[in-house]
Image: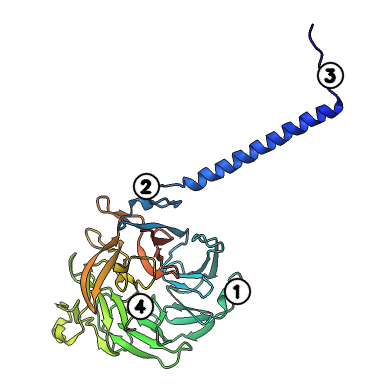
Amino acid sequence: MMKTIRFTSKSIFIVLFSLLIVSCNGKKGEKNDTASDEQSQPDNVDGDNPTSSKLPLDRLNLPEGFKIDTYAEGIEGARSMALGSDGTLFVGTRNENKVYALKDTDGDFKVDDVYTIAEDLEQPNGVAFKDGALYVAAVSKLYKYSNIEGSLSSPPTPELIYDDYPTEFHHGWKYIAFGPDDKLYVPVGAPCNICDRTDEDERFGTITRMDADGNNREIVAHGVRNTVGFTWHPDTDELWFTDNNRDMMGDDLPPGELNRLAEVGQHFGYPFCHAGTIPDPEFGSQHPCSDFVPPVQPLGPHVAALGVKFDTGNMFPSSYKGHAFLAEHGSWNRSKKIGYRITLVKLNGNEAVSYEPFIDGWLDDESQEAFGRPVDLLFMEDGSLLISDDEGNAIYRVTYGG
């Protein structure tokens, strides 16, 4: 005889409640498992260099032990960088006429918030930070945004520091930075491919400096065609800068330059002599190359070296300490493209002993297509290296893990 099972209302309630708990726990477990899988298997995994970037970072070649990922993406035209005292990364642009502020709010080395500080300036390539204020150079003008990190979402009306630098757009975009002397350094590029217009304005083809309020301006270096990157040696406080030499002398002439300013007023050759040894075909007869300061290191022809920084952090191996990293933006009119990489100039004192690639792969040599063009470099407090890219619209972060 089949035994009849009777359910009381109390027992039915207990069964249904138990099933509800099991069901909820099961869903919660599924959600956690999915999240775990997403974190451990990001997009574009490349062996020991996992990355969640939409850019093909697996094409980049780095020395053993180094990794690269994106710190920020979608930063249109990202060029010069400056770091605020509260960790805000300020980024200038050239053709986009914008200045950005980037914040990593949770400390995971990924930008969470992007603010537009300005969007109607003329080629605001240059940005610098000092005493809580952001300085922005826009061709002939310099602006100051006071207490900027406290008002990112509603930037203050900037103070105009000066508006009397040359207005020419040819090489008019500027890289700016404060030196160890608390002076603001501002270059003035030559307003042409090759010319001598110093009789019109002695500041053409120079690097100048001034107080933070725009006073006491002076020229510190002459004969500089167009520097878009400079820094100071960590031991000597001497100014080191890149320079882009003239075009239209063929694929292989002249080389670019990495220079060192040993004393105020030195002349580095433009427009008379290039890279210390090559007389200009138009102006070279006016002065011998021996009249000018040669570069510490001649660079590849038309590589367009921009940013330069010395490694002063504690993350990279000691063999990189005190050597110069360069961002080579890449050639624009060479029959076979060159540059599009980060290079390393190793030094013995003030003399270069080697010049070699550190990161390359942004340029595909076979197709001659590039997905990135490095512009500026910045070492973070933790020793990692940031690289801006105005072609890939990104900021990269390079780390070393041993």
Instruction: Name the residue nearer the viewer: 359 or 16.
Output: 16
For residue 220, above or below residue 353: below
Label 3 SS: loop
Query: Which is more N-terminal, label 2 or label 1?
Result: 2
Label 3 crowd (10 A; few <14 / some 14-19 / many >=20): few
Number of the label disc, if any, that sits on residue 6: 3
Q: Nearer the viewer, mark 4 or mark 3?
A: 3
Residue 310 at x, y percent in the picture: 34, 73
Instruction: Name the residue nearer the viewer: 285 or 358.
Output: 358
Residue 397 at x, y percent in the picture: 42, 61
Query: Which is more N-terminal, label 2 or label 3?
Result: 3
Q: CA distance from mark 2 to mark 4?
A: 35 Å
Q: Quadrant of the C terminus?
A: bottom left
Label 2 SS: loop
Number of the label disc, if any, that sits on residue 388: none
Label 1 crowd (10 A; few <14 / some 14-19 / many >=20): few
Residue 62 at x, y percent in the picture: 31, 57
| Three-letter residue code for mark 4 | Thr
Per the image, the residue denoted by label 1 is: 151
**Where on the picture, by quarter, is residue 63?**
bottom left
Label 4 SS: strand
Relative to 165, 113 lies left or right: right
| Three-letter residue code for mark 2 | Gly
For residue 307, above or below residue 167: above
Per the image, the residue denoted by label 2 is: 47
| Three-letter residue code for mark 3 | Arg
Residue 26 at x, y percent in the picture: 64, 36
Per the image, the residue denoted by label 4 is: 231
**Furthest residue to the top?**
1
Q: Residue at x 34, y 77 (%)?
A: 230
Query: Which is more N-terminal, label 4 or label 2?
Result: 2
Query: Which is more N-terminal, label 3 or label 4?
Result: 3
